[in-house]
Image: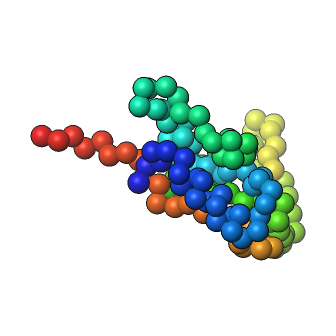
Amino acid sequence: GPLADYSKLLEALYQLKMNNLWDPPTAWLLSPLAWHQLQGLTSNEGQPLMPPSSVGEVKQLVSTAIPSDTVLTGDFSKLLLAFRSELRVEFLNQAYAKNFEYAFLVSCRVDAQPMHAELFAKLSGIAAPSTAKAK
């Protein structure tokens, strides 16, 4: 369901502590939906809800590349990146020649693998609040 408080994030931090990640995670990777829900949390009095220090001290990074129902966290210094093919740069001039313009097509295949999967946590199943109205 929707993020109604910081308890799910605290649960992820608890799991990381149980897996011996004692330093704070390097980042929260949030979908725009998760970021929006966290930024809109309010107390019963309507005041903005401040995150616990353990949640607030971790940098929040937002990306549309993250599935909308997902939050990732962990020690991203322990994430390995590998190039699966050479960086390829192609010069494109046919489609742009009439305007005296040039373009480049750049591609590369990259793969990622955690050194220790237990140093990462994934929250999934985050949903937008229901907009259904009772009759």
Please, is residue 65 above or below residue 62 in the view?
below
Pick the residue in front: 72 or 47.
Answer: 47
Please, is residue 114 above or below residue 124 in the view?
below
Q: How is the image coloured?
A: rainbow
Residue 51, given in percent of the width and then of the height, sits at 61, 39
Q: Is residue 67 left or right of residue 63?
A: left
Residue 74, given in percent of the width and then of the height, sits at 72, 60
Pick the residue in front: 13 or 40.
Answer: 13
For the C terminus, the image quarter is top left
For the N terminus, the image quarter is bottom left
Pick the residue in front: 67 or 89.
Answer: 67
Residue at 73% in and 42% down: 57
Residue 126, given in percent of the width and then of the height, sits at 47, 54
Q: How many marks?
A: 0
Q: Which quadrant of the structure image shows residue 115?
A: bottom right
Residue 13, given in percent of the width and then of the height, sits at 65, 58
One can see residue 132 in this view: yes
Q: Which quadrant of the structure image shows residue 105?
A: bottom right
Q: Which quadrant of the structure image shows residue 4?
A: top left
Residue at 25% in and 44% down: 132
Pick the residue in front: 15 or 124.
Answer: 15
Please, is residue 120 above or below residue 94 in the view?
below
One can see residue 67 in this view: no
Residue at 76% in and 35% down: 99
Q: Is residue 7 left or right of residue 117?
A: left
Residue at 44% in and 26% down: 46
